[in-house]
Image (cartoon, coloured by chain):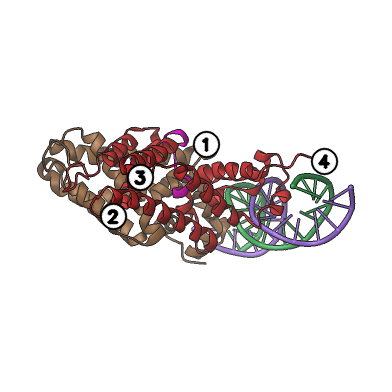
Chain colours: A red, B brown, C green, D purple
DNA sequence: GTCTATACGCAGATAGAC
DNA sequence: GTCTATCTGCGTATAGAC
Protein backbone atom coordinates (compact mmCIF):
# COMPACT_ATOMS: atom_id res chain seq x y z
CA UNK A 1 0.00 0.00 0.00
CA UNK A 2 1.31 3.37 -1.09
CA UNK A 3 0.77 6.53 0.89
CA UNK A 4 -2.18 8.47 -0.51
CA UNK A 5 -1.13 11.67 -2.27
CA UNK A 6 -2.80 14.77 -0.75
CA UNK A 7 -5.25 16.28 -3.19
CA UNK A 8 -3.83 19.74 -2.59
CA UNK A 9 -0.43 18.54 -3.69
CA UNK A 10 -1.88 17.41 -7.01
CA UNK A 11 -3.61 20.74 -7.56
CA UNK A 12 -0.46 22.69 -6.73
CA UNK A 13 1.55 20.69 -9.24
CA UNK A 14 -1.20 21.00 -11.84
CA UNK A 15 -1.00 24.75 -11.37
CA UNK A 16 2.71 24.77 -12.11
CA UNK A 17 2.12 22.72 -15.25
CA UNK A 18 -0.71 24.93 -16.47
CA UNK A 19 1.28 28.05 -15.75
CA UNK A 20 4.33 26.85 -17.62
CA UNK A 21 2.80 24.85 -20.46
CA UNK A 22 -0.77 26.09 -20.72
CA UNK A 23 -3.89 23.98 -20.94
CA UNK A 24 -2.97 22.03 -24.06
CA UNK A 25 0.70 21.76 -23.19
CA UNK A 26 0.11 20.31 -19.76
CA UNK A 27 -0.42 16.57 -19.74
CA UNK A 28 -1.89 14.21 -17.21
CA UNK A 29 1.21 12.05 -17.65
CA UNK A 30 3.49 14.88 -16.62
CA UNK A 31 1.25 15.68 -13.71
CA UNK A 32 1.29 12.05 -12.59
CA UNK A 33 5.08 11.98 -12.82
CA UNK A 34 5.34 15.09 -10.67
CA UNK A 35 3.25 13.69 -7.85
CA UNK A 36 4.58 10.15 -8.13
CA UNK A 37 1.45 8.44 -9.40
CA UNK A 38 0.41 6.58 -12.51
CA UNK A 39 -1.63 8.70 -14.90
CA UNK A 40 -4.68 6.51 -14.44
CA UNK A 41 -4.74 7.13 -10.71
CA UNK A 42 -5.45 10.81 -11.25
CA UNK A 43 -8.84 9.90 -12.66
CA UNK A 44 -10.06 8.57 -9.31
CA UNK A 45 -9.64 12.09 -7.90
CA UNK A 46 -10.58 14.23 -10.87
CA UNK A 47 -13.02 13.27 -13.62
CA UNK A 48 -10.95 14.90 -16.34
CA UNK A 49 -8.06 17.19 -17.09
CA UNK A 50 -10.55 19.96 -17.73
CA UNK A 51 -11.89 19.72 -14.18
CA UNK A 52 -8.43 20.53 -12.84
CA UNK A 53 -8.70 24.07 -14.15
CA UNK A 54 -11.43 24.98 -11.69
CA UNK A 55 -9.48 23.48 -8.78
CA UNK A 56 -6.31 25.27 -9.73
CA UNK A 57 -8.03 28.65 -9.97
CA UNK A 58 -9.96 28.13 -6.73
CA UNK A 59 -6.69 27.46 -4.94
CA UNK A 60 -5.10 30.50 -6.53
CA UNK A 61 -7.95 32.79 -5.58
CA UNK A 62 -7.67 31.48 -2.07
CA UNK A 63 -3.97 32.25 -1.94
CA UNK A 64 -4.60 35.82 -3.05
CA UNK A 65 -7.52 36.53 -0.75
CA UNK A 66 -6.64 34.69 2.46
CA UNK A 67 -6.43 36.94 5.55
CA UNK A 68 -6.90 40.08 3.52
CA UNK A 69 -7.24 43.24 5.65
CA UNK A 70 -10.86 44.38 5.88
CA UNK A 71 -11.35 47.04 3.18
CA UNK A 72 -14.02 48.72 5.32
CA UNK A 73 -11.47 49.65 7.96
CA UNK A 74 -8.23 49.60 5.97
CA UNK A 75 -8.90 49.78 2.25
CA UNK A 76 -5.39 50.88 1.37
CA UNK A 77 -3.87 48.03 3.35
CA UNK A 78 -6.15 45.60 1.52
CA UNK A 79 -5.24 47.15 -1.83
CA UNK A 80 -1.52 47.01 -1.16
CA UNK A 81 -1.83 43.40 -0.04
CA UNK A 82 -3.72 42.44 -3.19
CA UNK A 83 -1.28 44.14 -5.54
CA UNK A 84 1.67 42.85 -3.55
CA UNK A 85 0.54 39.23 -3.65
CA UNK A 86 -0.24 39.28 -7.35
CA UNK A 87 3.02 40.98 -8.23
CA UNK A 88 5.04 38.68 -5.99
CA UNK A 89 3.70 35.59 -7.74
CA UNK A 90 4.47 37.09 -11.13
CA UNK A 91 8.00 37.95 -10.04
CA UNK A 92 8.63 34.53 -8.57
CA UNK A 93 6.99 32.40 -11.25
CA UNK A 94 7.55 34.72 -14.17
CA UNK A 95 4.01 34.49 -15.44
CA UNK A 96 0.35 34.09 -14.56
CA UNK A 97 -1.54 30.78 -14.62
CA UNK A 98 -4.78 32.63 -15.08
CA UNK A 99 -3.59 34.43 -18.19
CA UNK A 100 -2.12 31.29 -19.70
CA UNK A 101 -5.38 29.47 -19.09
CA UNK A 102 -7.44 32.42 -20.34
CA UNK A 103 -5.66 32.18 -23.67
CA UNK A 104 -5.63 28.37 -23.60
CA UNK A 105 -9.23 27.39 -22.97
CA UNK A 106 -11.61 27.26 -25.91
CA UNK A 107 -15.19 26.33 -26.80
CA UNK A 108 -14.04 22.69 -26.59
CA UNK A 109 -13.50 23.12 -22.85
CA UNK A 110 -16.53 25.11 -21.71
CA UNK A 111 -16.23 24.23 -18.02
CA UNK A 112 -12.67 25.41 -17.94
CA UNK A 113 -13.60 28.55 -19.81
CA UNK A 114 -16.32 29.33 -17.28
CA UNK A 115 -13.90 28.75 -14.44
CA UNK A 116 -11.38 31.17 -15.94
CA UNK A 117 -14.02 33.81 -16.50
CA UNK A 118 -15.31 33.45 -12.94
CA UNK A 119 -11.79 33.65 -11.56
CA UNK A 120 -10.98 36.97 -13.16
CA UNK A 121 -14.38 38.49 -12.56
CA UNK A 122 -14.14 37.55 -8.91
CA UNK A 123 -10.66 38.95 -8.56
CA UNK A 124 -11.66 42.18 -10.28
CA UNK A 125 -14.73 42.47 -8.08
CA UNK A 126 -12.73 42.09 -4.90
CA UNK A 127 -10.30 44.73 -6.15
CA UNK A 128 -13.18 47.00 -7.13
CA UNK A 129 -14.84 46.56 -3.73
CA UNK A 130 -11.60 47.58 -2.08
CA UNK A 131 -11.31 50.72 -4.20
CA UNK A 132 -14.94 51.53 -3.56
CA UNK A 133 -14.26 51.43 0.19
CA UNK A 134 -11.56 54.01 -0.50
CA UNK A 135 -14.08 56.13 -2.43
CA UNK A 136 -12.03 55.85 -5.61
CA UNK A 137 -14.10 56.85 -8.61
CA UNK A 138 -14.99 54.20 -11.21
CA UNK A 139 -13.68 51.36 -9.06
CA UNK A 140 -14.64 48.53 -11.43
CA UNK A 141 -12.92 50.19 -14.35
CA UNK A 142 -9.79 51.01 -12.38
CA UNK A 143 -9.67 47.47 -11.01
CA UNK A 144 -9.88 45.94 -14.49
CA UNK A 145 -7.23 48.32 -15.83
CA UNK A 146 -4.91 47.60 -12.93
CA UNK A 147 -5.18 43.85 -13.32
CA UNK A 148 -4.63 44.15 -17.06
CA UNK A 149 -1.48 46.18 -16.51
CA UNK A 150 -0.03 43.69 -14.06
CA UNK A 151 -0.83 40.78 -16.38
CA UNK A 152 0.59 42.52 -19.41
CA UNK A 153 3.87 43.16 -17.64
CA UNK A 154 4.47 39.39 -17.45
CA UNK A 155 5.14 39.50 -21.18
CA UNK A 156 8.53 41.03 -20.47
CA UNK A 157 9.34 38.68 -17.64
CA UNK A 158 8.62 35.67 -19.82
CA UNK A 159 10.43 36.85 -22.92
CA UNK A 160 13.31 38.81 -21.50
CA UNK A 161 13.38 38.28 -17.76
CA UNK A 162 12.79 42.02 -17.42
CA UNK A 163 10.97 42.91 -14.20
CA UNK A 164 10.88 46.66 -14.75
CA UNK A 165 7.49 46.87 -16.50
CA UNK A 166 5.93 44.89 -13.66
CA UNK A 167 7.44 47.23 -11.09
CA UNK A 168 6.14 50.22 -12.99
CA UNK A 169 2.69 48.65 -13.10
CA UNK A 170 2.84 48.12 -9.33
CA UNK A 171 3.88 51.74 -8.76
CA UNK A 172 1.00 53.00 -10.85
CA UNK A 173 -1.40 50.70 -9.02
CA UNK A 174 -0.26 51.90 -5.62
CA UNK A 175 -0.64 55.53 -6.65
CA UNK A 176 -4.34 55.00 -7.25
CA UNK A 177 -6.45 57.95 -6.15
CA UNK A 178 -3.34 60.04 -5.49
CA UNK A 179 -5.05 63.05 -6.96
CA UNK A 180 -8.53 62.11 -8.10
CA UNK A 181 -8.68 63.15 -11.72
CA UNK A 182 -6.67 60.11 -12.76
CA UNK A 183 -2.98 59.45 -12.68
CA UNK A 184 -3.38 56.25 -14.70
CA UNK B 1 -2.22 18.59 -60.68
CA UNK B 2 -3.53 20.82 -57.89
CA UNK B 3 -2.96 24.55 -57.80
CA UNK B 4 0.00 25.36 -55.57
CA UNK B 5 -1.01 26.99 -52.30
CA UNK B 6 0.66 30.41 -51.82
CA UNK B 7 3.11 30.29 -48.95
CA UNK B 8 1.72 33.49 -47.50
CA UNK B 9 -1.69 31.90 -47.25
CA UNK B 10 -0.26 29.09 -45.14
CA UNK B 11 1.49 31.51 -42.82
CA UNK B 12 -1.64 33.62 -42.40
CA UNK B 13 -3.68 30.56 -41.46
CA UNK B 14 -0.94 29.34 -39.13
CA UNK B 15 -1.08 32.71 -37.41
CA UNK B 16 -4.81 32.33 -36.79
CA UNK B 17 -4.24 28.88 -35.34
CA UNK B 18 -1.39 29.99 -33.08
CA UNK B 19 -3.36 33.00 -31.93
CA UNK B 20 -6.44 30.98 -31.06
CA UNK B 21 -4.92 27.72 -29.83
CA UNK B 22 -1.34 28.58 -28.93
CA UNK B 23 1.76 26.70 -29.93
CA UNK B 24 0.83 23.33 -28.44
CA UNK B 25 -2.85 23.59 -29.30
CA UNK B 26 -2.24 24.32 -32.97
CA UNK B 27 -1.73 21.22 -35.09
CA UNK B 28 -0.25 20.70 -38.53
CA UNK B 29 -3.35 18.69 -39.41
CA UNK B 30 -5.64 21.60 -38.63
CA UNK B 31 -3.40 23.91 -40.59
CA UNK B 32 -3.45 21.53 -43.56
CA UNK B 33 -7.24 21.35 -43.41
CA UNK B 34 -7.50 25.13 -43.44
CA UNK B 35 -5.40 25.56 -46.54
CA UNK B 36 -6.73 22.47 -48.30
CA UNK B 37 -3.61 20.35 -48.22
CA UNK B 38 -2.60 17.04 -46.71
CA UNK B 39 -0.57 17.44 -43.53
CA UNK B 40 2.49 15.88 -45.15
CA UNK B 41 2.56 18.50 -47.88
CA UNK B 42 3.28 21.22 -45.35
CA UNK B 43 6.67 19.66 -44.73
CA UNK B 44 7.88 20.44 -48.24
CA UNK B 45 7.48 24.14 -47.41
CA UNK B 46 8.44 24.23 -43.75
CA UNK B 47 10.87 21.87 -42.05
CA UNK B 48 8.80 21.71 -38.86
CA UNK B 49 5.93 23.19 -36.93
CA UNK B 50 8.42 25.10 -34.86
CA UNK B 51 9.77 26.89 -37.94
CA UNK B 52 6.32 28.34 -38.58
CA UNK B 53 6.60 30.53 -35.51
CA UNK B 54 9.34 32.64 -37.05
CA UNK B 55 7.40 33.04 -40.29
CA UNK B 56 4.22 34.02 -38.48
CA UNK B 57 5.95 36.66 -36.41
CA UNK B 58 7.90 38.03 -39.39
CA UNK B 59 4.63 38.51 -41.24
CA UNK B 60 3.05 40.14 -38.21
CA UNK B 61 5.92 42.54 -37.72
CA UNK B 62 5.65 43.44 -41.39
CA UNK B 63 1.95 44.16 -41.05
CA UNK B 64 2.61 46.49 -38.14
CA UNK B 65 5.54 48.34 -39.64
CA UNK B 66 4.66 48.63 -43.34
CA UNK B 67 4.48 52.19 -44.65
CA UNK B 68 4.97 53.67 -41.21
CA UNK B 69 5.33 57.48 -41.23
CA UNK B 70 8.94 58.53 -40.78
CA UNK B 71 9.45 59.22 -37.06
CA UNK B 72 12.14 61.79 -37.90
CA UNK B 73 9.59 64.06 -39.56
CA UNK B 74 6.34 62.92 -37.92
CA UNK B 75 7.01 61.00 -34.75
CA UNK B 76 3.51 61.44 -33.39
CA UNK B 77 1.97 60.18 -36.61
CA UNK B 78 4.23 57.14 -36.46
CA UNK B 79 3.33 56.56 -32.82
CA UNK B 80 -0.40 56.85 -33.46
CA UNK B 81 -0.11 54.48 -36.40
CA UNK B 82 1.77 51.90 -34.32
CA UNK B 83 -0.67 52.02 -31.42
CA UNK B 84 -3.63 52.09 -33.79
CA UNK B 85 -2.53 49.03 -35.72
CA UNK B 86 -1.75 47.00 -32.63
CA UNK B 87 -5.01 47.93 -30.95
CA UNK B 88 -7.05 47.28 -34.08
CA UNK B 89 -5.72 43.74 -34.35
CA UNK B 90 -6.49 43.10 -30.70
CA UNK B 91 -10.01 44.43 -31.13
CA UNK B 92 -10.66 42.43 -34.24
CA UNK B 93 -9.04 39.16 -33.22
CA UNK B 94 -9.60 39.44 -29.51
CA UNK B 95 -6.06 38.52 -28.59
CA UNK B 96 -2.40 38.67 -29.56
CA UNK B 97 -0.52 35.88 -31.36
CA UNK B 98 2.73 37.13 -29.94
CA UNK B 99 1.54 36.89 -26.35
CA UNK B 100 0.05 33.45 -26.85
CA UNK B 101 3.30 32.27 -28.38
CA UNK B 102 5.38 34.01 -25.70
CA UNK B 103 3.59 31.96 -23.08
CA UNK B 104 3.52 28.83 -25.25
CA UNK B 105 7.12 28.36 -26.33
CA UNK B 106 9.50 26.58 -23.97
CA UNK B 107 13.05 25.30 -23.76
CA UNK B 108 11.90 22.40 -25.98
CA UNK B 109 11.37 24.84 -28.83
CA UNK B 110 14.43 27.10 -28.65
CA UNK B 111 14.13 28.45 -32.21
CA UNK B 112 10.56 29.50 -31.63
CA UNK B 113 11.52 31.04 -28.31
CA UNK B 114 14.24 33.09 -29.97
CA UNK B 115 11.82 34.21 -32.66
CA UNK B 116 9.32 35.40 -30.05
CA UNK B 117 11.98 37.25 -28.13
CA UNK B 118 13.28 38.93 -31.27
CA UNK B 119 9.77 39.89 -32.31
CA UNK B 120 8.97 41.75 -29.12
CA UNK B 121 12.37 43.33 -28.77
CA UNK B 122 12.16 44.59 -32.32
CA UNK B 123 8.68 45.97 -31.83
CA UNK B 124 9.69 47.67 -28.61
CA UNK B 125 12.77 49.13 -30.26
CA UNK B 126 10.77 50.60 -33.11
CA UNK B 127 8.37 52.11 -30.59
CA UNK B 128 11.24 53.42 -28.52
CA UNK B 129 12.91 54.93 -31.58
CA UNK B 130 9.69 56.73 -32.38
CA UNK B 131 9.42 58.16 -28.88
CA UNK B 132 13.05 59.16 -28.96
CA UNK B 133 12.39 61.17 -32.12
CA UNK B 134 9.71 62.96 -30.09
CA UNK B 135 12.22 63.61 -27.32
CA UNK B 136 10.15 61.63 -24.85
CA UNK B 137 12.21 60.76 -21.81
CA UNK B 138 13.10 57.13 -21.14
CA UNK B 139 11.77 55.97 -24.50
CA UNK B 140 12.71 52.29 -24.10
CA UNK B 141 10.99 52.06 -20.75
CA UNK B 142 7.86 53.84 -21.94
CA UNK B 143 7.74 51.68 -25.05
CA UNK B 144 7.92 48.47 -23.01
CA UNK B 145 5.28 49.71 -20.57
CA UNK B 146 2.96 50.76 -23.35
CA UNK B 147 3.22 47.42 -25.15
CA UNK B 148 2.66 45.59 -21.87
CA UNK B 149 -0.48 47.59 -21.18
CA UNK B 150 -1.95 46.91 -24.61
CA UNK B 151 -1.17 43.21 -24.30
CA UNK B 152 -2.58 42.96 -20.81
CA UNK B 153 -5.85 44.50 -21.92
CA UNK B 154 -6.47 41.48 -24.16
CA UNK B 155 -7.16 39.50 -21.00
CA UNK B 156 -10.54 41.19 -20.74
CA UNK B 157 -11.36 40.83 -24.41
CA UNK B 158 -10.66 37.10 -24.27
CA UNK B 159 -12.45 36.36 -21.03
CA UNK B 160 -15.33 38.81 -21.11
CA UNK B 161 -15.40 40.46 -24.49
CA UNK B 162 -14.78 43.74 -22.71
CA UNK B 163 -12.94 46.26 -24.88
CA UNK B 164 -12.83 49.07 -22.33
CA UNK B 165 -9.45 48.23 -20.78
CA UNK B 166 -7.89 48.18 -24.25
CA UNK B 167 -9.40 51.56 -25.07
CA UNK B 168 -8.07 52.96 -21.82
CA UNK B 169 -4.63 51.58 -22.63
CA UNK B 170 -4.78 53.24 -26.04
CA UNK B 171 -5.79 56.56 -24.50
CA UNK B 172 -2.91 56.42 -22.05
CA UNK B 173 -0.53 55.52 -24.86
CA UNK B 174 -1.64 58.42 -27.02
CA UNK B 175 -1.23 60.84 -24.11
CA UNK B 176 2.46 60.04 -23.92
CA UNK B 177 4.57 63.09 -23.22
CA UNK B 178 1.48 65.20 -22.59
CA UNK B 179 3.22 66.88 -19.70
CA UNK B 180 6.67 65.42 -19.27
CA UNK B 181 6.79 64.34 -15.62
CA UNK B 182 4.74 61.26 -16.42
CA UNK B 183 1.06 60.76 -16.94
CA UNK B 184 1.48 56.98 -16.93
C1' DG C 1 -6.56 4.87 -3.68
C1' DT C 2 -3.31 2.83 -6.43
C1' DC C 3 -2.01 -0.40 -9.55
C1' DT C 4 -1.51 -3.23 -14.46
C1' DA C 5 -3.33 -3.49 -18.80
C1' DT C 6 -5.30 -1.49 -22.50
C1' DA C 7 -8.13 1.25 -25.89
C1' DC C 8 -8.08 4.51 -29.45
C1' DG C 9 -7.14 8.71 -31.71
C1' DC C 10 -4.09 12.39 -32.76
C1' DA C 11 0.48 14.41 -32.68
C1' DG C 12 4.73 15.50 -35.67
C1' DA C 13 7.32 13.67 -39.14
C1' DT C 14 9.38 10.55 -43.24
C1' DA C 15 9.54 7.65 -47.79
C1' DG C 16 8.59 7.41 -52.22
C1' DA C 17 5.10 7.64 -56.33
C1' DC C 18 3.18 11.01 -59.61
C1' DG D 1 4.37 20.57 -54.98
C1' DT D 2 1.11 17.35 -53.74
C1' DC D 3 -0.22 12.92 -53.05
C1' DT D 4 -0.81 7.87 -50.53
C1' DA D 5 1.02 5.20 -47.11
C1' DT D 6 3.17 4.66 -42.93
C1' DC D 7 5.96 5.14 -38.58
C1' DT D 8 6.23 5.96 -33.67
C1' DG D 9 5.09 8.05 -29.62
C1' DC D 10 2.06 10.54 -26.65
C1' DG D 11 -2.55 12.24 -25.50
C1' DT D 12 -6.92 11.37 -22.48
C1' DA D 13 -9.46 8.02 -20.62
C1' DT D 14 -11.58 3.23 -19.00
C1' DA D 15 -11.79 -1.72 -16.90
C1' DG D 16 -10.84 -4.40 -13.36
C1' DA D 17 -7.38 -6.58 -9.86
C1' DC D 18 -5.37 -5.68 -5.25
Q: Which residue is mark 3?
A: A152
Q: Quadrant of residue A49?
A: bottom right
The one nearer the camera, B83 or A101, is: A101
Q: Which residue is mark 4?
A: A1
- Say yes or no: labels 1 and 2 on the same chain: no
The first of marks 2 and 3 along the sequence is: 2
The rendered magenta stretch, by its main secondary structure, is classed as: helix
Mark number displayed over residue A141: 2
Q: Gap between marks 4 and 1, in whole Å?
A: 37 Å
Q: Mark 3: which secondary structure? A: helix
Q: Which residues are magenta?
A: A91-99
Q: Gap between marks 2 and 3, in whole Å?
A: 16 Å
Q: Is residue A85 magenta?
A: no
Residue plotted at (63% across, 41% down): A9
The one nearer the camera, A166 or B109, is: A166
Task: Name the chain letter of the residue that bears numbered label 1.
Answer: B
- Say yes or no: labels 1 and 3 on the same chain: no
Q: Are discs 4 and 1 less than 8 Å apart at CB? A: no
- Say yes or no: labels 2 and 3 on the same chain: yes
- Say yes or no: labels 4 and 1 on the same chain: no
Q: Gap between marks 4 and 2, in whole Å?
A: 54 Å
Task: Name the chain letter of the residue that bears numbered label 4.
Answer: A
Q: Which residue is mark 1?
A: B107
The first of marks 4 and 2 along the sequence is: 4
Amino acid sequence: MREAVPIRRIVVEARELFREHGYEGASMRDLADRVGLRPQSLYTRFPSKESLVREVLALTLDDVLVDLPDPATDWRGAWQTLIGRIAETFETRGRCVGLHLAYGVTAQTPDARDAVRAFFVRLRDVMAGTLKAGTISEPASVAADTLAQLEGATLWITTEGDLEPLRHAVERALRVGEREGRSM
